[in-house]
Structure formats: structure tokens, C-alpha cells
Image (cartoon, rainbow, N blue to C red):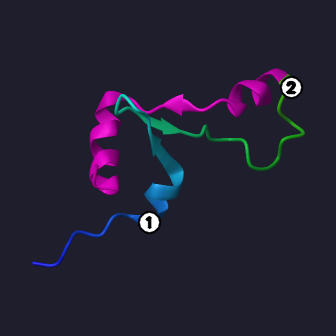
Amino acid sequence: MPKMKSRRRALKSYKVTASGKIKRRKAFRSHILTSKTSKRKRHLRKATLVSETEAYKVKRFLLV
């Protein structure tokens, strides 16, 4: 059986932390930023962790 291929887009979108949690970038920060407040954009700048239920699916994409 051939080896499993990871989802290449998922590898670029997510990072695995040392403790095994999945980090992701927040949405709504790519365009049409003039209508968003500075506070909102500042909060969107930070990365966040994927929820435990979603982390299971993402780990399967990443083959972790």
C-alpha cells in the first residue's frame, strides 16, 4: 500500500505546538479592513488554538 499523502494546504495553514495542540490563524483579516475597527483588527492578529473536536480532524489532515 502506498504511503498516505498529507493535505498540502492544511500543512501551510496549521502548526503543531510542542504539547501537540494545533495553532491556526484567525479569519476575517485578509481584505475589506477599512470597515473594521483597530481593536477588532488587533485581536484578529493573534493566532489561536483549534478546538479539541476540530483538532482531531486537522490532525488527520496533517497525518500527525
Residue 28 is drawn in which quadrant?
top right
Residue closest to the far bottom: 2
| Residue that label 2 marks | 38
State which region is magenta. Answer: 39-64
Name the front one of labels 1 and 2: 1
Q: Is residue 44 above or below residue 25?
A: above
**At which x and y percent is residue 14?**
48, 47
**At which x and y percent is residue 29?**
72, 42
Residue 36 image label? none
* Point 35% across, 47% down: residue: 58
Amino acid carrying mark 1 in the image? Arg
Residue 48 belongs to the span the image colors magenta: yes
**At which x and y percent is residue 25?**
59, 40
Q: State if disc 2 and disc 1 touch (CB < 8 Å).
A: no
Residue 59 belongs to the span the image colors magenta: yes
Residue closest to the far front: 18
* Point 43% across, 33% down: residue: 50
| Residue that label 1 marks | 8
Q: Nearer the viewer, residue 8 or 32?
A: 8
Magenta part mainly helix, strand or loop?
Answer: helix
- Compared across the picture, whether 25 is left or right of 15 comes to right
* Point 90% across, 39% down: residue: 34
**At which x and y percent is residue 47?**
60, 32
Please report whichever mark, 1 or 2, sits nearer to the chain's N-terminal start: 1
Query: How many other residues sit within 10 Å of disc 2, few (<14), some (14-19) or many (≥20)?
Result: few
Q: Nearer the viewer, residue 45 or 30?
A: 45
Residue 63 is drawn in which quadrant?
bottom left
